[in-house]
Amino acid sequence: MSGVYTAPAVPGKHTVKATDTTLNKTTGAVVTVFSSISADFNSRANTTAPIPSSLFGYGRGESLRTVSDRNLLTQAGVTTSRLSAQIASAYATQTPDWTKIDPFISAIQATGQHAILQFNQSPAWTESQFVSVDQSSRAIRNFGSLPC
C-alpha cells in the first residue's frame, strides 16, 4: 500500500480505511466522489449551487489606476478591496495620521466597494537602535536596554 488514495471511478459515497500496522490502529472516513463538478458564479441559469459574486474580492486595492478600472470590478460584482493600511506612513509619528489612506478608502467607497485593511508594516519609530547583528559570527549583541 502506497498511502495515496485513488478515488473509485464510480460516483457516490465510499468508505476509506487506513491502518497503521506499527500501532495496530485503524481509522476511516466517508468520502463523496463526483463524476463532475460545476460552479455557478451568480450569472448563469444553473442555480443548483450558486456562488455569489460577493464571495470574491481583490488585493492591492490602492494600486488600481483609474475609477474606470474599479468600476469594471464593481460591475462584475467584485466589491471587496483588500489594501495596505500604510502603517509606516500613517504612524510616521506616535500619533496616527489616517488622512494618509483616506484618498484610497474614498476611491474604493465611491464605486460601491468595501475596504478590508491589511496591517502589514511597522512604524520606523518602533525599531530599536540598540541591537546589532555581527554577521561574521551571527551573534546578536545587545548594546543597551531596549525601550519599553
Image (cartoon, rainbow, N blue to C red):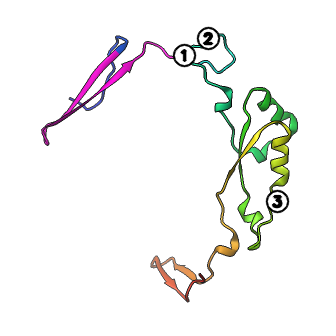
Q: Which mark is residue 38?
A: 1
Three-letter amino acid code at the position of disc 1:
Ser
Quadrant in which the N terminus appears = top left
Q: Are marks 1 and 2 in contact (CB under 8 Å)?
A: yes
Q: Which mark is residue 100?
A: 3
Q: Nearer the viewer, residue 134 or 84?
A: 84
* CA separation in Å, label 1 and label 2: 9 Å
Q: Position of residue 90 (x, y in %)?
A: 77, 64
Three-letter amino acid code at the position of disc 2:
Asn
Q: Nearer the viewer, residue 60 or 40?
A: 40
Q: What residue is shown with label 2?
A: 46
Task: Kindly indicate the quadrant of the structure image that contains residue 55.
Answer: top right
Element at badge 3? helix
Q: Is residue 20 magenta?
A: yes
Q: Is residue 7 above or below residue 90?
A: above
Name which of mark 3 and mark 2 comes first in the sequence.
2
Q: Which mark is residue 64?
A: none
Q: Is residue 6 left or right of residue 80?
A: left
Q: Position of residue 108 (x, y in %)?
A: 81, 42
* CA separation in Å, label 3 and label 2: 45 Å
| Residue at (72% x, 65% y) in the render | 88
| Residue at (69% x, 68% y) in the render | 123
Foreground mark, 3 or 2?
2
Q: Is residue 110 above or below residue 55?
A: below
Foreground mark, 1 or 2?
2
Q: Position of residue 96 (x, y in %)?
A: 77, 67
